[in-house]
Amino acid sequence: MRRAVQSLARFSALVAHQSAASSTSAAAVQAAACVGSRRWFATNSHDIFNTHRHEAHNNWDTEFDFTDANYEKVAEIISRYPTNYKASALIPLLDLAQQQNEGWLSLAAMNRVAKILDMAEIRVYEVATFYTMFNRSKIGKYHVMVCGTTPCMLQGAKGIYKALKDHLGIDYGQTTPDGMFTLGEMECMGACVNAPMIAVADYTKGVEGFSYHYYEDLTPQDVISIVDTLKKGGKPKAGSQHRSKAEPAGAVVDGKWVPSKPGADGMTLTGEPPGPYCRNLDEPAPEQAAAPK
Amino acid sequence: MAGVLQKYMAQAMGKASFRDAWKAGGWKMLIDGNLAETLFEHGPGAELVGTDKHGNKYFEKKDAQWVRNRFVVFAGANNWSTQDASSVPPEWHAWLHYIGDYNPANTEFKPPIYAAEASCHPSVVGPLGPVSATKVHQPKGSWFDPDKLTWRKVQAWQPPQE
Amino acid sequence: MQRYRGALARLQAVGLQSARGMAAAAQPAPAEDLIEVTVDGQKVSVPKGSNVLQACDAAGKDIPRFCYHQRLSIAGNCRMCLVEVEKSPKPVASCAMPAGPGMVIKTDTPLVKKAREGVMEFLLINHPLDCPICDQGGECDLQDQSMVFGSDRGRFTEVKRAVADKNLGPLVKTVMTRCIHCTRCIRFAKEIAGTDDLGITGRGRDAEVGTYVEKLMTSELSGNVIDLCPVGALTSKPAAFTYRNWELKTTESVDTSDAMGANIRVDTRGMEVIRVVPRLNEDVNQEWISDKARFQYDALRYQRLNVPLVRGEKGLQQASWPEAFAAIARAASKVQGHEMRAVAGRLADAESMVLLKDLMNRLGCGDLRSEAGFADLDADTRSSYVFNSTIAGVDQADAILLVGCNPRLEAPVLNARIRAANLAGVPVAAVGEQYDLTYPVEHLGANGDALDKLAKNSDYMKRLKGAQRPMVIVGAGVLQRADRDAVLAKVAKLVEKGEVVREGWNGFNVLHDAASRVAALDLGFLPSARARASKAAPKLVYLLGADDYSEADVPPTAFVVYQGHHGDRGAARADVVLPATAYTEKYGTYVNFEGRPQSTKPAVASVGDARDDWKIVRALSEVLGAPLPYNSLDDARRRLADVAPHLARRDAVEAPLWLAGEQWKAAGDRKAAADAAPLASAIANFYQTDAISRASKVMAKCVRARQNPIPGLHAASVGN
């Protein structure tokens, strides 16, 4: 009996595996050719290692320097902090360097920041490895980050992830072969009211044209059209895809936008909430009403 | 009784594997829980990885939980007194305990030569009887290996030759 | 807990203050600076600003700890030192909690035990169970404390993490999976060593200690992180897998690799030195030693002289002691006393020097000198050649001027002390060549002219004058210069004008680079007036372990006797080689640059036919017809005390008289012209300075590693 069950389970697993392989074999080949691979435990960092490994495009001989325009920004950022606490400017400067360097921090970029702020290089590495928003390995032009925290998950973040994965042919931490998109997961980005959502960092236009947009109230179709628009060089609508802000106009349910029922003005839910209901404080409590005068 | 049980188990677990289990364990499986577990629980579906020189069989079941997917069926499994864990050779011990993933059945290990074994070999004679000083491992400083004997705790300075 | 109790006792012995406060803590604090706290019902008074952990230590209570170290800044990240404080809702980390007046602290409640057990369980979650193959096993803080607070099983069912090992160079072996992130090594590198290379990268369970980019730990004190590491993450690379700590016999001795005389413990097994670790001495090395002191011991196995050698037709040939002595006697019979010369090496002990001096004087020879030394120095006034302020005095100094010295190489532990002073706000300035001293140095010029400029009412002069306890440190490199007298005269002027020597404070210091140097000067191991005047080449030269002699000291025609323990330049040149004992094999008095006589002790037996240095000289005196009346080590030491009485006061510094700078007058009178060359340090290669360190394979590896401190710096070979 047991064996039969086991062999059945094995068989079904095999079938599932093969069908998956046949349908996404092209994607699998692409994924294999992509930069980076997914790590198996929970972290949202784009990088696998917390130590540096020399690569042809990232080693001691790689050079990095801020442009003149960005040096003005550097001076402005440093001027925000007391002169004896110059190191406070570290995170904004790393961010600036990342924007200038096409979305990632090379060793040279971190060393440059260390030099500008007059700190030991290791202190810069420590900060850059601590924050997952700093990418220390090469990245696509658009960094697409799917929110994976509870409210978005409840509202269908998994479907968004699947749609992106199938459409782009890459998994989290990977980059498309054309170098356009890198897929990543992020913790709550604070747009839970319009869940599910993604954030896209646009590194195509350097520091000036850098944008970091949220796309909210997403259905799998929405996210595919956003990615396609970006690919064509267009500008998808930022923010909620189905309402102007966070007014109670509807919600994403099962991967579809469901508008609120007409007339249900002021209702945040798509229908009547199921009980138990709150007591109406304007009416006297039944036992109070029934109490003898 | 045995026949009925055999029939029922053969149906439940597949004829071939039960036949193997019965052949290896026989009725002892009924009173030896370890053996039964090895043969019934793990046995079906496991892959025979190899057999060592003592005839112990080594199995791996890839879909079992890690750290529980390698096991040995001793050569004399139907007799408890021959189920001797010390009969597992070192290279199989390493595989069995996940020290390495090298399958000893198809891996060339450098064979260690122990004095006890070599002394049985009649063709070599050493200072303490038939021992080959060159073949047997000796620690540094050992009298039995002239090469090892040259080891010094302190290395003297050699004056430059003129 | 044994080791931990030892650490505690040590802590109590040295008081409860941080390194810099030590001197201040020597005097009992005034009553108004004390606060009273209660620890487990016992009232103790501790200085204001102490933390709860220090108060518990003062009460004699064991507080387990990993990250807290009395010489490092407080990190508070291991949480092992949790205690209960009354009115606090939670257990508090005692190392990070300032003690307040009237605080009621409990260290032995069930809550405390439970809290620490919880911490220990977390620490052990990712700690591998590889104690049997770990070099720290047996002296591991985590092992010891898990005996008290550890459980025999954990509730952790996931997979343990693994961390890639880091390559920190040839000295420190890393097994980073064992790391518990106490950050002691990071704080040591940042605060004490001053090479800010280590840090924590990543976060959460992915955090790892390392350098991020593979690079060498470029500190001369890097070995100390091995002692600091409470687990087996950082261990000694040269000694990896060679010992268990309980197999070792320990001998308390003194290091001779530099002139500081760091206190060391030599751990031996059989006749092998297995490791060298520092011994606590607040006045000398605190609890650090340099990498050379720690790791050069492997040289005691290599290149040893174990039998007497006599030069025959085929070069140096083995001989017996009588044969070797007979050969010397034959050569000595052909020369007059004044045609001889004795040269003392860097590692010569005071006993053998005083005996050799007596022997040479008896034979009519006055030409005694030190190798790579200053044969014509006037050593009449002791205060002109020692470190008058003492090493502990660096803690009290408030202005430091370095003249032609590189303390980082000449005495790395002293450099750490200067660095500590600098971090506390003491400005450090330098005249001479520029070196990276791991702290900011105001560079005031390169050569003697700069000293003149300084003396002329310069800005710095005013600051020096305004300081309470100024220090001027003159390097050994200055004393070795040809224009020494001129430079010293300038320094003298500077010292006089800057009032560096005042009532109760002598700020003039000489930093020597060789262990034997101060003893040689104290004993007058210097050429006599006649020898100084003589231009004749000596016909017999006696090298007492001297390998760095100048060619002029040893003429090619001379008959050379070499007495020493390692085959090096001296032995190769010698006609007779007499095997002697190294510093781990003998009782020998060494005087450090402060003038502190300390004694080495034999940790292992001598090698082969080698004999103690003083015994060789004594035996030789018999053969040469001038027998010395010293038949025991005590006799030799009595003679030592006769010649220089302060050498009888072991481990103590006798403050020398300043004599109002009279000694400088003589130097100034010689009117030598100063050279324009920059004042440079006497040491260029830290790792190879004497016969022992040159024979060491580990030191050779360090030299190679330093040539390429950052692997892949120029990544021509990098693939992908």
Image (tube, coloured by chain):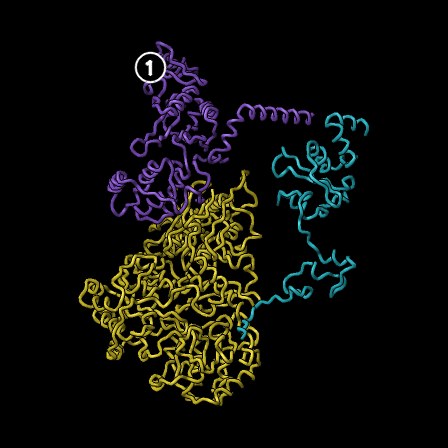
Chain colours: A purple, B cyan, C yellow
Q: Position of residue A207 (x, y in %)?
A: 31, 34
Amino acid type, callout 1: Gly
Q: Position of residue C180 (x, y in %)?
A: 47, 47
Identity of the residue drawn at 33% across and 14% down: A266
Q: Position of residue C38 (x, y in %)?
A: 38, 52
Q: Residues within 10 Å of mark 1 (few under 14, many from 20)?
A: few
Image height of C402 relative to C149, above or below = below
Image height of C597 relative to C73, above or below = below
The residue closer to the viewer here, C207 or B150, is B150
> Number of marks in the image?
1
Image height of A104 relative to C225, above or below = above
- Quarter of the view holding residue C308: bottom right
According to the picture, the residue beneath numbered tag 1 turns out to be: A266
For the question of whether residue C649 can be seen, the reply is no
Q: Is residue C222 left or right of residue A24?
A: left
For the question of whether residue C676 can be seen, the reply is yes
